[in-house]
Amino acid sequence: MVRGRFAPSPTGALHAGSLVAALASWLDARALQGEWLVRIEDIDGPRCIEGAAANILQQLALCGLHPDGEVLYQSSRNNIYQQALNQLIGRGLAYPCACTRKEIEEHQASLGWSLARHQTAVYPGTCKSGLNGKAARAWRFNVSQWSKLRGSPEVHWIDRRLGTQLQNVQDEVGDFVVKRADGMWAYQLAVVVDDAEQGITHVVRGEDLTDNTARQFLLQEALGFAHPHYMHTPLVLGANGEKLSKQNEAKVLDLSSSKAICFAMQAAASTLGLSALAQPANASVALDEALNIWTQEWSQRYVRAKP
Ligand SMILES: [Zn+2]
């Protein structure tokens, strides 16, 4: 069974950018005649806003995007993530880290690493051989150990839209955090565990998450999970050329009337390169028709074209 998902963080209402990801994942699941699930990624407690999850679900429903099963909340899944971490620890694939961000930056500087070149802060492996009496703050995945066991630090994967991708996680990211110093679960671990447990076969999400995929591939391997197929969709850019996000005050979608909903959905579809549709008098019929036509277009582009 093909199964896709949309996994928003409840840090605010849906905006034009998140609606694109929602629509793309919905169309993909429909085009593949599969199920579409919604997962609320509310593990980062302090950033979540009360009522935002309910609001997002209501916005999706207004847009005709209804999940085919129960909505999953990450905040209720502490034990499951801990089991996955225990499994990694038991196999020597995760270790505690006592470093503060400042210590990591100082260590990088002493090694002559420049952040500009590496972009993401590569962890230098300070605590790999022990904590030297310091208290554990976070837990890290032992990328070099797993790379040895799997035979290569390079992760190759194929994005259904962007094509072949390659990342050397050991060099470009290093041993990444799976449980944070504040006790919260890292995005990478929670996503991998949830995608596997929900039986997600097709992940469709925004392009800004593309470079997380190699890390998720390694965790999937180490935990014995199958890899889903991945597709990363275009982002909606703000006037400053940066990705629209709740942080840079993307405008809340106007879904106050059938006409406004059609307008918002047309904008999302056009970001995905789907055709614009004339708007008949009855907007809710138009939305149903539009979703059907966009599903066919999606199918021609991403399903039938590729085996
Ligand atoms: Zn450390």
Image (cartoon, grey):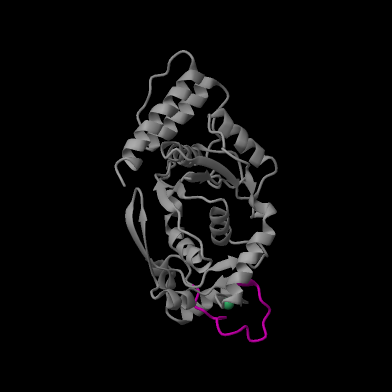
| In-front residue for pair 285/245 | 285
Q: Which residue reaches farthest left?
A: 305
- 164 falls in the magenta region: no
Q: Can you say whether 2 is above or below 224 in the image?
A: above
Secondary structure character of the magenta stretch overall: loop
- 137 falls in the magenta region: yes
Q: Position of residue 299 (x, y in %)?
A: 36, 37
Q: Quadrant of residue 96?
A: bottom right
Left or right side of 13 for 272: left
Q: Position of residue 56 (x, y in %)?
A: 60, 38
Q: Can you say whether 172 is above or below 165 in the image?
A: below
Q: Is residue 100 visible?
A: no
- Which segment is the magenta one? 123-139
| In-front residue for pair 246/74 | 74
Please state the quadrant of the image where ligand 1 appears.
bottom right
Task: Please name the residue shown 53% across and 36% down the image.
Answer: 251
Q: Position of residue 214 (x, y in %)?
A: 43, 62
Q: Is residue 169 visible?
A: yes
